[in-house]
Amino acid sequence: MDKSVLLTGHQEVAKFLERDFNQCFQQMRHYDGQILDICKFAFTAYTAITGASLALYQYGRDKNINYSRPAASLFLIGLLIGSCLFAMLVRNRVYFVIVARYVNEHRDYFLKGGTLDLKIQAPIYGPDEPSYFNWLSSQSLLLYVLAILNSVLLGLGLFLLFDSFLWITWLAFTASLILLSLQLIFAIRHLKSQGSKG
């Protein structure tokens, strides 16, 4: 085979890998940004829903009208929205890790087989990093916050819905803890199962 054809083929492969690396790096930033955007939207939505629900409840108390059910409904609608946002956050973490691992494969390949005498002191992740679930990653911390806020919405909704019930504080607190646990179990199991696939 002609050397010039072989050289041109290698150059095309190198150009493709360079473009692929750059696009994947941008995609990785995109997923990380989406996770932050989901959280910003969630915090705004939770604030608006809580404000509207409590204002409606207080207005009813001032006018001697029982608006506890409509106020509780707002909290429960907020919980449905929050649950969707929580699931989106988990899914985006999976996408982020897939792309980050691919980027790290590129790095690993070129750093191990490179001809340059390059000594990198900074810890560079290998192709099996980042892990899908890391207790202390910033994305996991945002997951915890969203799970807690969803649980608070459930507790407040139940509290307003059954405010005349004697044990409502205990019931609302218990239901909130159960929902918090279920959300975290779902997220952690799902993320860890993604890791076992690859």
Image (cartoon, grey):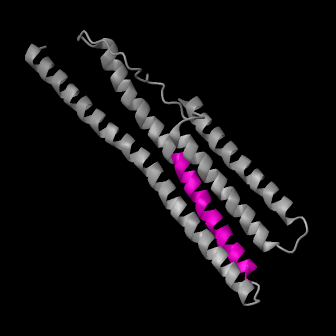
**Viewer-proximal residue among 191 and 58:** 58
Q: Is residue 12 above or below residue 44?
A: above
Q: Is residue 57 above or below residue 7?
A: below
- Report which quarter residue 163 is drawn in: bottom right
Q: x and y percent of residue 4 in the render? A: 8, 17
Q: x and y percent of residue 156 in the render? A: 72, 66
Q: Please tell me whether the stretch drawn in magenta is mainly helix, strand or loop.
A: helix
Is residue 9 shown left or right of residue 166? left
78 drawn magenta: yes
**Viewer-proximal residue among 162 and 89:** 162
Is residue 45 shown left or right of residue 148? left
- Residue at the spot 65% in from the left edge and 75% down from the top edge: 53
- Residue at the spot 33% in from the left edge and 16% down from the top edge: 120
Per the rendered image, the range of residues in magenta is 67-91
Residue at the front extreme of this rendering = 62
- Residue at the spot 33% in from the left edge and 37% down from the top edge: 25
193 drawn magenta: no
- Report which quarter residue 104 is drawn in: top left
Q: x and y percent of residue 50 in the render? A: 62, 69
Q: Is residue 59 above or below residue 145?
A: below
Q: x and y percent of residue 26 in the render? A: 32, 42
Is residue 4 shown left or right of residue 28? left
